[in-house]
Image: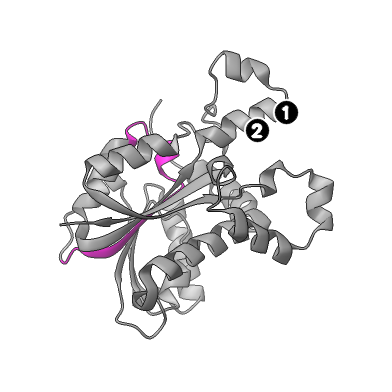
């Protein structure tokens, strides 16, 4: 399979991922992790960080960083996504804080200067060579810079298939999506990603599960509970095992050591 381009699914992606509770949980936990790990360097009014949002899609999270005063470079392989991100930045009066690159992560030019913070959220599970993507991202980072990786968690894929009775998927090791919809092609094991990052000399600062219980709840129950309570409890259990390892996505923050 080849790496996935989202030109044909941009509207579906936006509607299903960021227009509801799923997307708001994701954004809330990502912001919490970065707030706690970056501290004063991340808050509004601090010296602006140079941020790369690699495979940044429509820039939902990137715009939250621009509102804090940081300077964003957003790249994406999808021309549709890039144009949507550009229009959203203009609508929010943030266009002056963005530089848009319509390209894949693998073809990113060498930056000058290097970036202080690199984001790669919900991208690795769509590329055939995720190790190559992580290696490329590290070359974009200044000494002491932070990498924020969020990826689709294979443990959650297995568990969800088991509790739903999709035993054939497990027996036949068919955990990947077909490439026709929004089910990722290459779900990843957190322990493999962590081991690879250690091999690259990265210092792990934080690990969190994203949506450790929300996606397992019955739809009727989700609709009866308040979103505020769900997000609060997602935060509470996101770093606690065994819940963290069952998150639909897994978030890692790591720092370059040289």
Quarter of the image where the N terminus is located? top left
* Left or right of residue 202: residue 112: left
Residue 211 at x, y percent in the picture: 61, 50
Measured from the top left, where is residue 241 in percent x and y?
55, 45
Query: What residue appears at the point 39 percent right and 66 percent down from the top-left corner?
Result: 37
**In the visual, does 93 lie left or right of 255?**
right
Q: Which residues are magenta?
A: 113-130
Residue, x 23% and y 46% (percent of image)?
Answer: 136
Quadrant of the rendering where the C terminus is positioned: bottom left
Which sits in the foreground, 153 or 139? 153
Residue 164 numbered tag: 1
Asked if marks 1 and 2 touch (Cβ < 8 Å), the reply is yes
The answer to whether residue 108 is visible is no
The front one of 23 and 189 is: 189
Secondary structure beneath label 2:
helix
Residue highlighted by disc 2: 160
- Residue 203: give x, y in percent of width and height: 28, 53
Residue 73 position by quadrant: bottom left
């Amino acid at each position: 399979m080849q790496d996935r381009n989202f030109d044909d699914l941009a509207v579906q992606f936006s509607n299903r991922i960021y227009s509801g509770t799923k997307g708001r949980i994701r954004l809330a936990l990502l912001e919490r992790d970065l707030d706690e790990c970056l501290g004063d360097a991340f808050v509004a009014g601090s010296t602006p960080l140079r941020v790369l949002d690699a495979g940044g899609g429509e820039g939902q999270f990137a715009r939250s960083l621009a509102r804090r005063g940081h300077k964003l470079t957003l790249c994406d392989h999808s021309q549709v996504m890039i144009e949507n991100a550009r229009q959203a930045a203009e609508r929010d009066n943030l266009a002056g804080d963005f530089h848009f690159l319509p390209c894949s992560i693998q073809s990113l030019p060498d930056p000058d200067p290097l970036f202080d913070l690199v984001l790669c959220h919900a991208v690795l599970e769509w590329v055939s060579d995720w190790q190559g993507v992580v290696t490329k991202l590290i070359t974009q980072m200044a000494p002491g810079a932070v990498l924020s990786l969020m990826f689709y968690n294979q443990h959650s894929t297995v568990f969800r298939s088991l509790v739903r009775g999709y035993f054939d998927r497990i027996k036949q090791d068919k955990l990947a999506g077909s490439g026709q919809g929004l089910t990722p092609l290459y779900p990843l094991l957190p322990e493999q990603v962590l081991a690879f990052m250690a091999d690259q000399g990265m210092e792990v600062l934080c690990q969190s599960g994203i949506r450790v219980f929300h996606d397992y709840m019955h739809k009727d129950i989700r609709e009866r509970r308040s979103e505020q309570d769900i997000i609060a409890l997602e935060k509470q259990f996101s770093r606690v095992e065994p819940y963290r390892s069952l998150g639909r996505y897994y978030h890692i923050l790591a720092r370059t050591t040289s």
